[in-house]
Image (cartoon, helix red, strand yellow):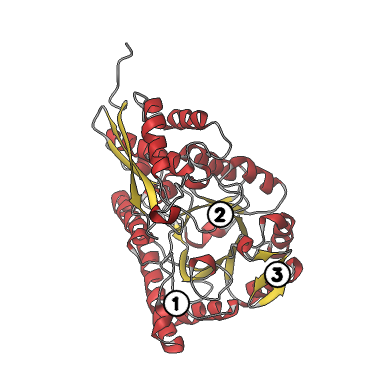
Amino acid sequence: MVPTSRYSIRYVKALQVLDSRGDPTVEVHVVTEGGGFGRGIAPAGASRGHREAVEARDGGRAYGGRGVLKAVEAVNKYIAPAILGADASNFREVDRRMIQLDGTPNKSRLGANATTATSLAVVSAAASTAGQPLFEFLGGRRARTLPVPMMNVINGGVHAGNELAFQEFMVLPVGASTFSEALRVGVEVYKSLREYLKRTYGIGAVNVGDEGGFAPPMRMVREALEALVRAVEAAGYRVGSDVVLALDVAASQLYRDGSYWVDGARLGADELLELYVRLVEEFPVVSIEDPFSEEDAGYFRKLREALRGRALVIGDDLTVTNAKLVELHVAEGRVDGAIIKVNQVGTLTEAEEAIETLRKLGKKAVVSHRSGESEDTAIAHIAVAYEIGLIKCGAPARGERTSKYNELLRIEDYLSGDARYPGFRVLQL
C-alpha cells in the first residue's frame, strides 16, 4: 500500500448553493488527512465568450432551469472517486486528472462549474493543511504585491436595467501609496458619485446593478464618464493622477448584423474605433476591455495601434483565460493584456498557465470576479500570489464584492510592512 500523507485527499463533497443573483451554483468541500479544509464556489458570468468553458445546468422547472444538480452529481459521482487519495499540495496534478476525466475542450462533460469549484477547494485545502494563507501557498514568501482595484461603480449592458451600452465604468485609485488607502479613495468616490446621481437624476438613480455599481437612467457613454469625473473631483481627488478611469465595453453584447448599437445609434467598427479614440482624448481612460466583438478581432489591433502609449486594450471574451488564445492574440498584436477568470477555463492550473503566458510575453493580467459571484475570496489570493497588480471585484458594495476587498485588507495586514502597492506603475507595459 502507498502510505498516505497529511496532504492526501480523504473527503470530497459537492452541494448546490446560491450565487449573488439568486441562481444555484456549485460549492465543493475538500478535507485532507492532515485536517486541512478547503471550500470552493463557482461563479457565473452574464456575458460570456463563445470559447469559454461551459457550465452544467439542469434545465426543467426548478430554479427556472438554472439548477446545478447535474454538476453536483458530476463531482460526487465522478470527480471525487478520481481524486480521493491524491496529494492536494500537487493541485496541478489533481486538476489534470479532472481535465482528463472530462475529456472535452470546454468542460462540457463534467461542467466548468463542477471543475472550478473542485479545483479551488483542493488548493484551499492544501493551503489549510500547510497552515498558510492561500496566496502564500501559491506564491511563496515573495508574493507581497497588492493589486490596484478596478472598481465598477456605474453598471450598464447586461449587468443593469438601464440604457447604457457599455457594461462597466470603472475608477482606479492609482495615486494611493497602499491598498488600504486606495480602497478608501475608491469608497469615497463611490459615495460622492451616489450623491451626484441622487441630485441629478433622483433617488432611483442609486439602485445598483449586478456588480454593486449604480445603474442610473443614463443613455450616453459620455454622460457616465462625466459623472465619474465630477464624483472624483467632488471627493477631493485629481482626475488623471489620483484616480483614472477604465471601461469594460463587452462589445459582443452590442454586436448585431455587423454593427454595434451605442448611445442609441448604429455604428460600424470604424466609427466605434473613432469613438474610443475621442473618449481617451477627452477623459483619463487608461484601459478598454473587449472593445469589439470576437468576430471583429482585427479591430482590436487597429485600436491598440491608435491608442498606443495612452490606454491598454484588454481581452476577455476574446481570450477566455485560455493560454493558447492569449498567445495567439498577443502574437497578432491585438491585446495588451487579458482578463483572468478561473471558471472561464475550468481549473486554477489552466488559469495559471494563462497568467504565465501573459507574464512571459510582457503583457498585463487582470484577475476578475464574475457578475454572478459568491462570498468565495480565492481571487483576492490569486491576485497577490501571482503579483498580478490589477483586480476587478466590482463596486465597494454588496457582500460578494466586499468580501474580496476585505480579504485583501487582511492580506495587507498579514504582510505588514512588506506589502507593496504598485499604483500607476502597474499600467505601464
**Mark sitting on residue 272:** 3
Closer to the camera: disc 2 or disc 3?
2
Q: Is residue 32 above or below residue 424?
A: above
Residue at the front extreme, as displayed: 61
Q: Residues within 10 Å of mark 1 (few under 14, many from 20)?
A: some
Residue lying at 72% horizontally and 72% vertically, measured from the top left: 267
- Residues 76 and 137: in front is 76
Residue 413 visible, this angle: yes
Mark 2 or 1, nearer chain start? 2
Callout 3 secondary element? helix
**Dots 3 and 1: beta carbons under 8 Å?**
no
Image coordinates for residue 355, horizontal then vertical, percent: 53, 44
Q: Amino acid at mark 3?
A: Leu
Image coordinates for residue 129, horizontal then vertical, percent: 28, 33
Q: To which quarter of the image does residue 36 belong?
A: top left
**Mark sitting on residue 178:** none
Q: Amino acid at mark 2?
A: Arg
Image coordinates for residue 385, horizontal then vertical, percent: 42, 44
Closer to the camera: disc 2 or disc 1?
2
Callout 1 secondary element? loop
In whole angstroms, how far apart are the C-alphas of marks 2 and 3? 21 Å
Q: Is residue 123 above or below residue 221?
A: above
Say whether residue 114 is left or right of residue 274: left
Q: Is residue 256 above or below residue 350?
A: below
Callout 2 secondary element? loop
**Mark sitting on residue 237:** 1
Residue at the top extreme, as displayed: 1
Quickly name the residue at label 2. 48
Closer to the camera: disc 3 or disc 1?
3
- Residues 427 and 121: in front is 121
